[in-house]
Amino acid sequence: MHKGEELIIKDGRHPVIERNLPVGESYIGNDLELNKSEQQLIILTGPNMSGKSALLRQTALITLMAHTGSFVPAAEARISLTDKIFTRVGASDNLSGGESTFMVEMNETASIINNITDRSLILLDEIGRGTSTYDGISIAWSIAEHLHQSPHQPKTLFATHYHELNELEEKFPRAKNFHVTNKEVGNKIIFLRKLARGGSTHSFGIHVAKMAGMPPSLIERANEILLHLESIHENGKAENITDKVKNITTSKMQLSIFDAHTETFSAIRKLLEETDINRLTPVEALLKLQEIKNKLK
């Protein structure tokens, strides 16, 4: 056990996820460092499904395993003495008790804020997401700022989709931005699951919705609305989001009984556009034709 005030993990992995990976697939390890002098608060951004929550969980598990005297899933680990591991990860509610998901989130976070010590490790995931955008950002920023300015200086890993929190690095000396990397190849997103310095500017929520099987027409409409909301005035100043929402035009396409056929034809058209006919062998051409026929069923 390291007696300093730092937490250093080299090539850390999540023991449960790693054990359940498909044969031939290896877990992508990550380095992590938290200390009270230079890097007390990490603001972690990155796309949906990129591995932010897994990184938070493996940090908690490695710290706990080290304190039990166990071997840990890492190439190297120096874990300072930790008296409490505080986590606020995942959504839950208490409807029977009259508490919403957001109220439970605030209760749990308040409990963390009011019980931190000099040796606490805090792992927060998506604080503030259960309310409006402005409320959420304000609460998340205030919580991160409070943890940084606390006399206890608890080591904190703060995962968020609010990219605005990346500004904290410019204002507070021990706040540092990290993101989980990804790579865009054509219209696809490849999650590299590797931690890197700097903040992220994209969440790729619409891409994840597409992966989940949302109808193509819905995805296309979501992209149209996103482009509208991300647009800026000619003078370079961002338009008020409320005004932008008011200015969103209704969808040109109305839902009809032919939507299923439209989606099928769109899928076939996309398949044909991605096919290089000049490179197909006769057998591959027949298989491609069969694939198109199956889509019509």
Image (cartoon, helix red, strand yellow):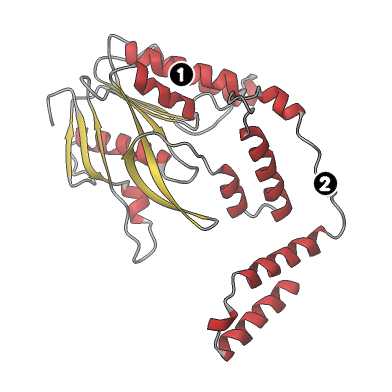
Q: In front of the other: label 2 or label 1?
A: 2
* Location of residue 191 with respect to 291 vertically, above or below: above
The secondary element bearing badge 2 is classed as loop
The x and y percentages for residue 41 are 32, 24
Residue neighbourhood size for the residue with mark 2, other residues' Cα within 10 Å, grouped as few (<14), some (14–19), many (≥20):
few
* Structural distance between the alpha carbons of marks 2 and 1: 39 Å
Which residue is located at x 58 percent, y 27 percent? 93
* Location of residue 147 with respect to 34 vertically, above or below: above
**229 displayed left or right of 259:** left
Q: Looking at numbered disc 1 in the image, what kind of residue is underneath it?
A: Trp
Q: Nearer the viewer, residue 73 or 51?
A: 51
The x and y percentages for residue 121 are 30, 25
Q: Nearer the viewer, residue 169 or 142?
A: 169
Which residue is located at x 24 percent, y 38 percent? 65
The x and y percentages for residue 44 are 39, 33
Q: Nearer the viewer, residue 111 or 210?
A: 210
Residue neighbourhood size for the residue with mark 1, other residues' Cα within 10 Å, grouped as few (<14), some (14–19), many (≥20):
some
The secondary element bearing badge 1 is classed as helix
The residue identified by callout 1 is 141
The x and y percentages for residue 244 are 70, 28
Most extreme residue toward the bottom is 282
The residue identified by callout 2 is 252
Q: Looking at numbered disc 2 in the image, what kind of residue is underneath it?
A: Lys
**37 displayed left or right of 269:** left
- Which of pointers 2 and 1 lies earlier in the amino acid sequence? 1
Quarter that holds the N terminus: top left
